Image (cartoon, helix red, strand yellow):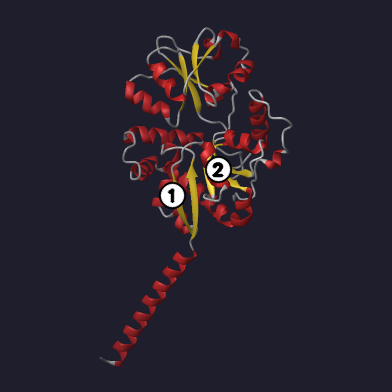
Amino acid sequence: MSYRTGIVRAFAFAATAAFGTALASQSASAEDVNVRFSWKLKGEYGFFYLGQEKGVYKDAGLTLKLGEGAGSQAALGALIQGQEDAVILPGIFAISAIQKGMPVKIVALYQPHAPVVLISHPENPVKSPQDLEGKKIAHSVGETGTSYLGVFCELNKIDCDKVSKVQMDSQSRVPQFLQKQVDVVSVYLTNDLPVLEERTSVKYPVLDLTEYGLAVPGMAVVASNDGIEKRGAAIKSFLAANAKAIELTRADPAAATGALKAVWQAGPSDKVIQQQIEETSRSIEAPSGKPVGWVDEKAIADALKLIGSVEEIGEAKPLSTFYTNDLLTQ
């Protein structure tokens, strides 16, 4: 071997070793972030998986671990026990839990208005709030779409005494509607409606509750007060990566569909998943000039009034108790 060849090989070996060391160092410095959904997989969660596939969280120095859930209460319990760094759940449930004393905060609110609608049968449509009078509407305890019907009636000057709320188990609502035992049922644009319309081949008349003034906080990121104090930097990186993942999903919903489908083999058709993802993108908003996820204090105040309309909440806690925007970046 010549002197020059030896030098070249030595240099190549050193460069390779340095590159390997850098990768190992990067991997070692990546922080695990455990995130739990409040429910099973659905199109609303598509942007997280596209972000993973595109390396958005890895680039932020994070190893993101996502898990399905079994309800908001269970997700919040795991958060308080330190099993999760953040949970994804409807903001209205977080606000209710905080008012009751749970030491958590909303650190990002992606859906200031949950995309919940009322659907009816084409031959007996409900196209305006006034059309609800004389109708039977399915209702289950804690259900977003009908729990605040009294407020909705008041906002739209309709007589709620003329609307028959038929209470039933949450799993029975849609079957009872399909069997025409009730005239109206609430569903999410980002979840139930695309599935239902594909299954039945029916285009259902839709009454958009947000269009008529009912603003119920939807998808939010919630962290414990202890977690914010101890892992604030990691949560901040997670939220910044989410913002990038959301924009990638807006630009390419088909790619987000593929990324979610890769982990959701038992899910609905690609068409339905993409509809869910596109509706989710439309529902994610932020005040002008603010980062995505920004929490408007008025949304918290209005939500507290909603909760107080259906249950006794006592004296409302200071609004700053419920949220922080400190972990969001422009």
Q: Which mark is residue 77?
A: 2
Answer above or below: position of 111 versus 21: above
Q: Secondary structure at mark 2?
A: helix
| Label 1: which secondary element | helix
Give the camera-side residue of 154 and 275: 154
Residue 52 place in picture, x, y as percent? 42, 51
Mark toward the start of the polypeptide (1 vs 2): 1
Tell me if residue 181 comes above or below residue 65 in the rendering: above
Towards the viewer: 186 or 225: 225
Q: Are marks 1 and 2 in contact (CB under 8 Å)?
A: no
Q: Quadrant of residue 100?
A: top right
Residue 292 visible in the picture: no
Query: Which residue position holds label 1?
Result: 51
Tag 2: amino acid: Gly
Q: Is residue 234 above or below residue 131?
A: below
Q: Where residue 318 sits: x, y (%)?
A: 73, 38
Disc nearest the viewer among 1 and 2: 2
Q: Residue shown at 47%/16% (left/top)?
A: 184
Residue in the picture at 57% in, 8% down: 162
Q: CA distance from mark 1 to mark 2?
A: 26 Å
- Determine whether, in the image, residue 144 is placed left or right of residue 200: right
Residue 295 numbered tag: none
Regarding residue 276, the answer to whether it shows in the image is yes
- Label 1 neighbourhood size at 10 Å, few (<14), some (14-19), many (20+)? many
The quadrant of the image that shows the N terminus is: bottom left
Label 2 neighbour load within 10 Å: few <14, some 14-19, many 20+: few
The x and y percentages for residue 195 are: 37, 28
**Looking at the image, is 193 positioned above or below residue 66?**
above
